[in-house]
Amino acid sequence: MKTTYMNPYLAGFLLGITLLATIVITGRGLGASGAIKSAVVAAVSTISPNHAHESKFYSENLKSLHDNPLKAWLVFEVLGVIIGGFLSGVVSDRLNFVTERGPHITNTMRLGFALIGGLLFGLGAQFARGCTSGAALSGMAVLSTGGIITMMAIFGSGYAVAYFFRKLWM
Amino acid sequence: MFPLVPNLISDELNLIVALVIGIAFGFILEQAGFSSSRKLAGVFYGYDFTVLRVFFTAGVTAMSGVIILGYLGWLDIDFVYINPTFLQSAILGGVIMGFGFIIGGYCPGTSIAGMAIGKIDAMFFVAGGLIGVFLYAEMYPWFEGISNATALGNIRIFNSIGISQGLFALIMIAVAVGAFIMTTMIEKKVNPEGPAKSFNNTYHRLAGVGVLTVGIALLFLPDYKERLFTKVSNEEFLHSHSVKEMTADELAFRIIDKDPKLTIIDVRSSSEFSTMTLPGSINIEHKQIFQKEFSEVLGQRHKKKVFIANNENEERTAALITQELDYDNVYILCNGLPSFMNTIIRLEPETNECSFASTSNGNVHNQIVKLDAKQAIDTERFRTKASVTIAAMIKEAKNSMTKPTKLIKKVAGGC
């Protein structure tokens, strides 16, 4: 039997408390896309150290991560997210290899769009210096102007184009 | 005062903290249903507003907590990472991410939670994210310009639009509660079987009223530091709270004497400080008095801590804040630093008495305040000598000045 999801307001409150605890203990917010960046920097600098050395993006990031891109706060946090998500899946009996999609598209299409969506999110998060967690949510908690602008831009553009992609979901 | 990083938690321990926080983060995301792309996308089509509910409740909770802890003086916002604002790229990045959200059905954090329970679409989304970052990195030379344009620093939204922090927080909460009510009505129409069906109306209404009450309370909670500044700048407070004063002569005497029990604290800006200051003084700008690294200096009870600034009022504000923070043995320099320079260095004594009766019990001081004929001569003789000695000491101090200012050690952050 699959248990139901938590009440969203309760989940939001608990998430808010987690974020607050993060700020109080570490002085920084939550994040996710930063770990993806760390992974890319680590991969490129391992496969092609010369290329990483010559590129401004990689060398700057390597420098700010003390030449060890995987020993970063967000990498450990995201490892935690995987563990926590898995534990929650165990508790609520939701572990399953499935592809979730709208009723009118095929699995292959869904996976293709997921890849494109991820690509856009990865790209956008570099411009905005954070994603929904790092820029929008954490930015809102500390009332950062940029974070709140990014939040409005994410949801604004999502709503603006939702109509054109409705076939993907409904 | 929090945060504990960077001063109390080492880098290594911080990574363990990150792991534990991540576990909580991931568990909550999955429990909320954020591992499901169809549930997430529902926010854009009206059949499931879970994203909006969780996201805004979390944001409002954390924001209120930050403001309340800031008011109590437990959280020093100057140490907290405030995402820097790059106006153009914040909008551009957000717009691109909006497309990514609709097309991909996830955002990075939720895709990782989805991946953790085996969602294959979430795995593809994460793979896409890696490619996206890689593309950005490879095309960085083209993107660098727009990415770094309109850098506005670590600005905060209420300053940007010119209202108080509390008012902005209240507006945010009111907007969130309004959005919760409206979207629940929409959801019930679009999708009668949606999550809103099982909501307990009584509890939700009570929670809504509770949150709005918190919002109204936030209106009256300024930041602890601002509160202290306002408190000590108040005329009445200034007059009802005395600070011990030290005359120019006493300070000069102690400087020449190289008094080990004297600490001069220069509260002017660091640029003024590096141009000229008194020998042996340290620079702590007004706002820095709260910082942990200066608590050692300010906490030395047996030392006389003399505040110097361009005028006595600035000294007094700094000294009163220091006293409010429970440090004692605090003094201010009578009439400020310019008067000291006139009296001692240029030998053009100013006749202004210290504006508040001095309670200093230093011997030197008492002798000089009660000026009879003999003492007047002594004073003049002392000043003539002191002017040369101290001028030389100031010059020497300037030459040997190393970088004395400790900048705020900011926490590193970012996504």
Image (tube, rainbow, N blue to C red):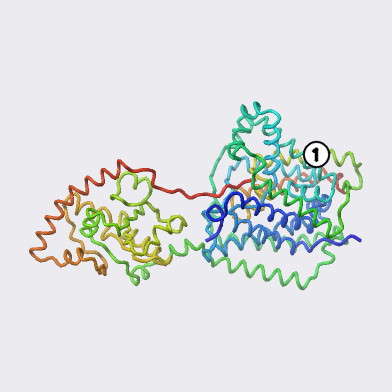
User: Where residue A46 sits in the image (x, y, percent)?
Assistant: 69, 32
**Kind of element beneath mark 1:** helix
For the point 60% across and 31% down, which residue is it?
A: A56
Quadrant in the picture for residue B267 = bottom left
Between B262 and A104, the residue placed more toward the observer is B262
Relative to A33, residue B52 above or below:
below
User: Residue A37 location in percent, x, y?
Assistant: 68, 40
Task: Tell me: residue A88, above or below residue B119.
Answer: below
Q: How many marks?
A: 1
- Residue B239 left/right relative to B221: left
Between residues B314 and B257, which one lies in front from this camera angle? B257
Q: For the residue carrying disc 1, how many other residues have a C-alpha within 10 Å: few (<14), some (14-19), or many (20+)?
A: many
The amino acid at mark 1 is Leu
Q: Residue furthest left?
A: B373
Q: Is residue B4 left or right of residue B232?
A: right
Q: Residue at x 77, y 73 (%)?
A: B202
Judge from the rendering whether residue B99 lies leftward or rightward of residue B287; answer left or right: right
Does A159 sit left or right of B387 as displayed? right
Image-quadrant location for residue A88:
bottom right
**Residue B210 at what x, y percent from top left?**
67, 71
Instruction: Identify the image quadrant of the C terminus of chain B.
Output: top right
Give the image location of residue B336, x and y in percent: 28, 57
Which corner quadrant of the image does residue A33 belong to? top right
Chain letter, disc 1 residue: A
User: In the displayed structure, would residue B96 be above or below residue B158?
Assistant: above
Pointer 1: what residue? A115
**Residue visible at 37% across and 51% down?**
B283
